[in-house]
Image (tube, rainbow, N blue to C red):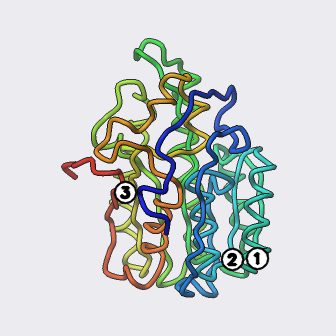
Amino acid sequence: METTNTMPQQIPPQYQVKQPGTEQQMHPSPVYDTDEPGCNRLQGKAAIITGGDSGIGKAVAIAFAKEGANVAIVYLDEHTDARETGEIIKNKYGKQVLLISTDLRKEVNAQDVVARTVEAFGTIDIVVNNAAVQFPQESIEQITAEQLETTFATNIFSQFYLTKHAVPYLKEGSTIINTTSVTAYRGSEALLDYSSTKGAIVSFTRSLSQQLIKKGIRVNGVAPGPVWTPLIPSSFDEEKVASFGQDIAMGRPAQPVEIAPCYVFLACKESTFINGQVLHPNGGTVLNT
């Protein structure tokens, strides 16, 4: 993997109008992959990854394919990003990829995702609940009921829906990995509703892990710190984007490729005694967890 010193250190001012953003408009482009070979740690597995078209989800999808997994990428309407990710999985790593454009805020769509994945791959071994939105506001008074419902439906309801319909197909040894956030632990003044959903995901992960371990299914989470993804320039103004990640110990945001190994580890046999836990790739923020 590239070293810390070779990762992009500075982010120029930029802004995108629409959530969750697209990588084509980002400068510099996020780093999603390295030249290091895979080790077949997920050979023959099938994974569903929500928000897998860009950002952390894209890096995870590529990493899973590199390790031998077939991947279903679930995304909203960022078709160009999704197609480019799919081409990497298929052409560079020779794995099957299923692209599903849908809105997981509706339970029926989550049910459809599961059905289409099983039809395509014959199985589901790994579920990565990763899709999310965030809408910064200075005050709780500025958070409308519509925004609150959108944030919770996207960030936490979708995880319930997809997991609920995937569980009947998961076998002993399967894994579920939920993306939470450093904001679940330290809070965020400007992301009150977002950080609330991320806290809910931590509790969801811990509680579900106790329920599903009886079936031999492990459930864990990943709580990244600042990561350079399309969600950032589509959430914050140009000034905040330019200083994004500079307030942490490492002084810069992570690249998605630096977060993906956490998901590979939690999905493979190297983590068989880890359940109900959250990994913290956050650049040095010390947390009481």
Above/below status of 14 relative to 279: above
Residue 50 in picture, x, y percent from top left = 62, 56
Closer-to-camera residue (230/105): 230
Q: Nearer the viewer, mark 2 or mark 3?
A: 3
**Mark number displayed over residue 70:** 2
**Mark number displayed over residue 237:** none
User: Which residue is disc 1 drawn over?
Assistant: 96
Question: Which residue type carries mark 1?
Answer: Gln
Mark 3, secondary structure of its residue: loop
CA gap between label 2 and label 1 equals 5 Å
**Could you tell me which residue is drawn at 43 percent across and 80 percent down?**
215
Question: Which residue type carries mark 3?
Answer: Pro
User: Which residue is disc 3 drawn over?
Assistant: 281
* Sequence-wise first label, 1 or 3: 1
Displayed quadrant of residue 74:
bottom right
Residue 259 in picture, x, y percent from top left = 46, 59
